[in-house]
Amino acid sequence: MKKIKNIISVLIIINIFFLIPICCVSADNKSCSIDNNIMNTAINAMRINACAIKSGDNTICTVKDKATAESVIDDFYYKYAICESNEVLLEIKWNEMPQIINVKEDICNILSKEDAINLIVSAANINYTEVAALSITGNTKTSNTMSVSYTKYVKLTETEEYNTITENSKTLYQDQSQIKQKGIQGVKEYIYKIEYINDKEQKRELVKSKELIKPQEEIIIRGTKIRESPEYILPTTGFVSSLYGERNGELHMGIDIANSKGSLIFAAKDGIVTRTEWYFGYGKCIDIKHNDGSWTRYGHLDKFLVNVGDKVNQGDEIGLMGTTGNSTGYHLHFEIRYGIWPCGRTVDPSYFLDLSKLKN
């Protein structure tokens, strides 16, 4: 009610102020100004009771009453006590406790709670360097913002890169490599004791550390074998559509080379034809045994150009490309195997073929 009366008084005085002539002419034609007392009365009438928040000798801001001032101070203080899931608050304190002072203030200079908090937080972020320096010397009286010191335990995880080791292999060609052991990044957990002033880190101390995942070295095998005359040649032309290895949760036991229907298929190495028939998911399939204990398989053919028992030389035409069996397009499925035919273990054909000669 008292504030309403003050506002009414201000409005009345303002009206009086504008009704009084700004200047008048006396009998001797000398101008005169508004009486200073009337002006001072008008100015004073615009000042109302309020509460100023002070830090040291400096007024930070002014709000309407003590309750608002206390709420602003508490919000600023407890903002720094909030912890994330990886933090523990150890200590929090004012560098200098703010004061609430009753004042008379121009109504235009009185801030709402929200504006006061925004002003103080912005000032704290801008002036943290000054605040930190003053805190170290024990003097915060010249600071133009409030400052809070607090300490937290903070748990952080950091990755640790693995080393890569290269081993040589005489069985692989110089343009071939293989991952023997996949590298794994290590993970370490650190607990730091960190001191802050107004959200800005001042000091960090390592309390303890723990290895969560030990890094595993990556081992890469690189070939040293020199290509002279090719042991195996490319069995067809086109582009590689699928490599040897895991595919859809299963082992893809060869490589797929895609091209158009009827593309020629060649014997990759000298040998004897041991199969020319439909063979399960391979569709129309050719197997050729070689004299070094290996044999090759050619699947999804459209047509055979050789018969069982034929002796073929490296590069001879043996069939035409198709899409028979478990196939979704025209391509050759090519395998290299070692062991007693028709069993044996598969090996990656890319170890023996120069795939760079195929289209990308």
Image (cartoon, rainbow, N blue to C red):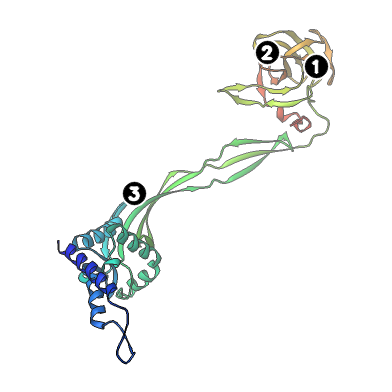
Q: Tell me which residue sits at (19%, 60%) in the image.
A: 67
Name the residue tied to disc 3.
84
Is residue 326 among the parts visible in the rendering? yes
The C terminus sits in image quarter: top right
Question: Which kind of residue does numbered mark 1 sit on?
Answer: Gly
Question: Which kind of residue does numbered mark 2 sit on?
Answer: Tyr
The N terminus sits in image quarter: bottom left
Q: Nearer the viewer, mark 1 or mark 3?
A: 3
Q: Are marks 2 and 1 in contact (CB under 8 Å)?
A: no
Tell which of 300 and 103 is nearer to you.
Answer: 103
Q: In the figure, is residue 335 to the left or right of 126?
A: right
Q: Distance between the residues labelled 3 and 2?
A: 59 Å
Tell which of 234 and 139 is nearer to you.
Answer: 139
Q: Is mark 1 on a helix, strand or loop?
A: strand
Residue 98 locus on image (x, y percent): 24, 68
Q: Going from the N terminus, do you reach mark 3 or mark 2 first?
A: 3
